[in-house]
Image: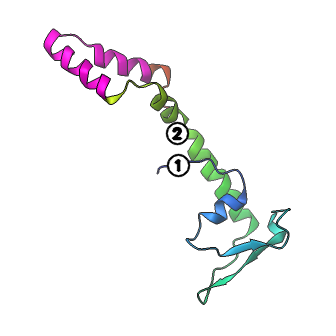
Amino acid sequence: MILFDRYETIEDVLVHMHLHQWFGWTDAGNKIYKNLEIYEVLGVTHPKPSEQELVDALAAQQAAYDALEYTRQRKNVYPSVQDQLDMQYHDAVDSTTTWEDAIAAVKSKYPKPG
């Protein structure tokens, strides 16, 4: 699962549940569950999720996003693809392990949890 952004509110969960605008707020300045309203769109009314379902979905997405923090950290410090290819070429020609060492250093600095 690719998680581009960490959800911060139940509105983030709702936005990603369906492709069209299927919900709104009775008070746009106070986006809490009791102000959530579900619209009929193209003749379809989706069932209103319970508050607990939204809270659980928010917590699950946040946990999944947070669990992949190491990948975001690694991405920022890995050498560029061009540099890695250059390292691999020189390793093959010079019988060195520059590329392996560079990748191992990043993986060691930001280990996969668990």
Q: Earlier in the sequence, mark 2 or mark 1?
A: 1
Is residue 60 within the magenta segment? no
Image position of 100 (left or right of 108): left
The amino acid on which the numbered mark 2 sits, given as a three-letter code, is: Leu
How many labels, in total?
Answer: 2
Q: Secondary structure at mark 2?
A: loop
Local packing at callout 2 (Cα closer than 10 Å; few below 14, some 14-19, many 20+) is: some
Q: Which residue is mark 2?
A: 68
Mark whose residue sits in front, 2 or 1 = 1
Image position of 103 (left or right of 52): left
| x, y percent for residue 10 | 71, 59
Is disc 2 in contact with disc 1, using a CB cutoff of under 8 Å?
Answer: yes
Is residue 92 or residue 104 the one in the foreground?
Answer: 92
The amino acid on which the numbered mark 1 sits, given as a three-letter code, is: Leu
Q: Which residue is mark 1?
A: 3
Height in image: 7 above or below 99? below
Which residue is at the far bottom?
43
Query: Magenta region, mostly helix, strand or loop?
Result: helix
User: In the figure, residue 105 lies in which quadrant?
Assistant: top left
Query: Which residues lie in the magenta part?
Result: 82-107
Is residue 93 within the magenta segment? yes
**Residue at point 63%, 64% (across, down):** 15
**Residue at point 64%, 58% (across, down):** 57
**Residue at point 57%, 44% (across, down):** 65
Local packing at callout 1 (Cα closer than 10 Å; few below 14, some 14-19, many 20+) is: few
Image position of 41 (left or right of 52): left
| x, y percent for residue 84 | 30, 24
